[in-house]
Amino acid sequence: MKLLLENWRGYLGEDNEELAPDQIEFPERYGNCGMLAVALIEEGLKREIQGIEVVFVTATDEDEFLEVDEPEIHHVAMWFNGKYYDDRGEISKDQLGDFSPLGLTSPEDAKPKEGRDYLTLSYKVENIEELGAVTDIVKNNTDWWKSCEEYTQRAEGFWDNIK
């Protein structure tokens, strides 16, 4: 599957030469954050861990997010036990918006601010069927190029070390 995706991206002219250095070094922050979150949640469900939520950082309100064909997703993370996690590990709620574009009302040197530049929407994921719906949203609305299977070992290590 990985080879298929690489060849497909090459065919479309979307190879690593067109990616910014940060995108190459940190693919989970630039398109694959959703696949990492899905892998973390899937492993948590396999271990029967309760209270896991997926967090979408978006510019769309909750009603539109569920109804619109292509919601604008800036970042995807996981929430568990009162903490947020992405490829950086544990992060603060303010860090969720780090990859959100600034709105027209934001000063150039400002950090993205929740409610002004982005919204966070959380959804509890209790079973594989619900995870399937989350996976569909991620696959259809992010610029992913790595599959969630590529994050299986990382997800296993995460849950082995979680406190």
Image: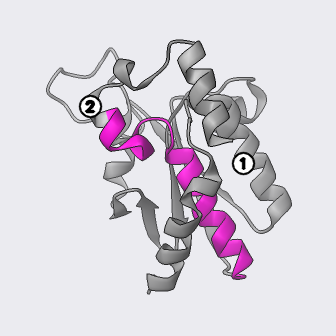
Type of residue at label 1?
Answer: Val
Residue segment shown in magenta = 23-48
* Residue occupying image coordinates x 80% and y 57%: 130
Q: Position of residue 154 (x, y in %)?
A: 49, 66
Q: Residue furthest bottom?
A: 163
Q: Mark 2 — residue? A: 21
Quarter of the image where the C terminus is located = bottom left
Image colouring: one colour
Q: Is residue 80 visible?
A: yes
In the rendered image, residue 47 lying in the magenta stretch gets the answer: yes
Q: Residue at x 56, y 35 (%)?
A: 145
Where is residue 61, by image quadrant? top right
Q: Name the outermost residue toward the right.
A: 129
Element under disc 1: helix
Nearer to us: label 1 or label 2: 2
Q: Is residue 138 above or below residue 140?
A: below
Where residue 35 sits: x, y (%)?
A: 58, 48
The residue at which mark 1 appears reads as 134
Disc tally is: 2
Q: Secondary structure at mark 2?
A: helix
**Residue 68 rendering spot, x and y as whole percentages:** 73, 24
Residue 121 is at least partly visible in this image: no
| C-alpha span from label 1 to label 2 | 29 Å
The residue lying at 57 percent from left, 30 percent from top is 6
- The amino acid type, in three-letter code, at marker 2 is Pro
Instruction: Using the rendered view, name the quadrant where residue 37 is placed.
Output: bottom right
Residue 82 among magenta residues: no
Residue 148's disc number: none
